[in-house]
Image (cartoon, rainbow, N blue to C red):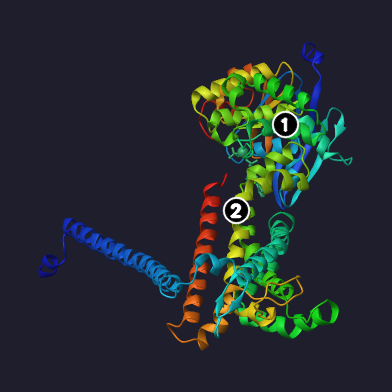
Amino acid sequence: MQVAAAKETIFKINDLNLWYDDFHALKDVNLEALNNEIFAIIGPSGCGKSTFIKTLNLMINMEPGVRMTGEINYKEKNLLDSRVDLVDLRRKVGMIFQKGNPFPQSIYDNIVYGPKIHGIKKKSELDEIVETTLKDVALWDEVKDRLKTSAMGLSGGQQQRLCIARALATKPDVVLMDEPTSALDPISTLKIEELMTELKKKYCIVIVTHNMQQASRISDKTAFFLHGRVVETAETGKIFSNPEDKRTEDYISGRFG
Amino acid sequence: MAKASVTPSAEERLILTKKNRRWDEVRGRSLVTICAIIMIVATIAVTIFLAQKGLQSFTVNNINPIAYLTSTNWNPVGENASFGIFPFIFGSLAVTFLSALIAAPLGIGAAIFMSEIAPKFGKKFLQPVIELLVGIPSVVYGFIGLVVLVPLVRDNLPGIGFSLFAGVIVLTVMILPTVTTIATDAMRSLPNSLRQGSLALGATRWQTIRKVLIPAALPSLLTAIVLGMARAFGEALAVQMVIGNTRDLPGSIFDTSATLTTIVTLNIGHTTYGSIENNTLWSMGLILLIISFVFIFIVRYLSGRRKI
Ligand SMILES: Nc1ncnc2c1ncn2[C@@H]1O[C@H](COP(=O)(O)OP(=O)(O)OP(=O)(O)O)[C@@H](O)[C@H]1O
Ligand SMILES: [Mg+2]
């Protein structure tokens, strides 16, 4: 704990409960995500992983009938009590979806979309954002000669990396990823995993994954969700080698889920 | 015992159903093939017939095709008969483009309202209303135009009421549901991941609509407009009832005018088959067909450019 204290707390979740109409999807969730760390969320299908990660940038508010209690503290500001500025929040908390979802526009326009919305107009500045973010996601060399061609012509893995670049272009503090590699082949997956370990030097990363190896390879902390509850959360090494809860052990060793 | 010999064995049954299935397959396939062939033959037959009839005014009656298309003098009877249909081509194109110009923003706006702003209300109330409007026969639109619109124009605007303007308004109302329906489908078929991707970057709903969704749906939205134009271009009855049907080039939008379709429907009944005037009407039919083909090519080109 003394070592971790050096890192800034980005998200602190206190007693978060969430309902879809009458369905109680998240129950008393308490978690903490630190800067410069990868926080992995694992658990069987339907346990509430996507629901949880969508609360962190309030994308959950798009779903009809959602109700929440508790606290989602993002840098000591509770997203649930004050009227938060969604535009600002989502600039700072980027999100990557399961499948790459580039806009059907050019590679260049995809990346400058966020910065333009947030008021950057100067071409030289935009050009620079495109170059640095594409270099950050190791896509620059592959696409630098066709920045003006459609992003739909990229491969699945390239599209996903472009979406990461697009999220980085708004200069976020946090990157949320919901199963970012589940639609990708092993090589693209590996590239994105390398990318994440690189990115955590600058950002806080929260990732949902079904892939145990992935969680154990890249993450610093892991939380195991079951039926909307956090069963256990700990250092990744500890969860995978010596879990405290029997259900965590069962899940990790593949006995259910 | 006897029963057992009648009942086919499992293997026989398998062969039997296989045979049945193959027969089913053949029958089904020939049925749809015949339908397709009938369609194609009908289209080709109409095209050939119209081409052959439509060209007669040039081949048999020796009308100069250039003069026919560009002259503004339409005087089909009498000594110095003259056949210039430019005013009607102009009228057709004018009502088509002007009505599309009004219907496009309205229809696309309504489509965005139904797909993005109030999807539930849109599906429940607006959609049935619009589908109903598509089904109303054009003579009804024309009649309402004649009884309500024309007097209104006469009392409040320059001209005698019957006008290019009245035709444009009637057509706008007629093609609006078409444009709206197709544009709504186009917006609805955009994947939700686009909306999410944009909102997750901090865009507002309006920015998402303007900068992501409309550009993504643009080819389909243009298709909606072109199909609306095709309908406007081909409409005869409703326009004929309000446009005034005069043969001169209109000087203003409040002047009376005529279109290719209104001239054909008005005159084809009282000209003798094979006469010069009759042949020139067929030529107008041919021009209508050619321009319709152009619309279809535009639509095909646009759907080939769909981005998603
Ligand atoms: N919009 C919604 N309305 C009602 N119930 C929902 C909604 N979205 C999710 N749920 C329910 O909430 C529970 C958690 O769903 P969630 O999508 O968070 O699961 P998940 O852990 O991400 O699963 P997976 O691994 O399959 O992606 C599920 O039981 C699901 O049926
Ligand atoms: Mg999920």
Q: Which residue is mark 1?
A: A112
Where does residue B148 sit, x and y in percent of width and height? 76, 83
Where does residue B272 sit, x and y in percent of width and height? 46, 87
Q: Is A247 placed left or right of B252 in the picture?
A: left
Q: Quadrant of ligand 1?
A: top right
Q: Is mark 1 within 8 Å of ligand 2?
A: no
Residue placed at 50% from the left, 22% from the top? A187
The residue nearer to you, when weighing B36 against A47, is B36
Where does residue A211 sit, x and y in percent of width and height? 55, 27
Residue A19 visible in the shown view:
no
Where does residue B290 sit, x and y in percent of width and height? 50, 64
Residue placed at 68% from the left, 72% from the top? B249
From this viewpoint, which residue is outermost toward the top? A3
- Marks 2 and 1 on same chain: no
Residue placed at 84% from the left, 40% from the top? A80
Q: Which residue is mark 2?
A: B220
Q: Is A57 placed left or right of B127 in the picture?
A: right
Chain letter for the residue marked with disc 2 in the picture: B
Judge whether A31 appears above or below B291 on screen.
above
Residue type pointed to by label 2: Ser
Chain letter for the residue marked with disc 1 in the picture: A
Measure the alpha-carbon separation of dots 2 and 1.
25 Å
Q: Is B305 placed left or right of A32 in the picture?
A: left
Task: Report which quarter residue B149 is drawn in.
Answer: bottom right
The residue nearer to you, when weighing B195 against A194, is B195
Residue type pointed to by label 1: Val
* Residue A211's disc number: none
Q: Residues within 10 Å of mark 2 (few under 14, many from 20)?
A: many
From this viewpoint, which residue is outermost toward the right? A82
Judge whether B97 appears above or below B202 on screen.
below
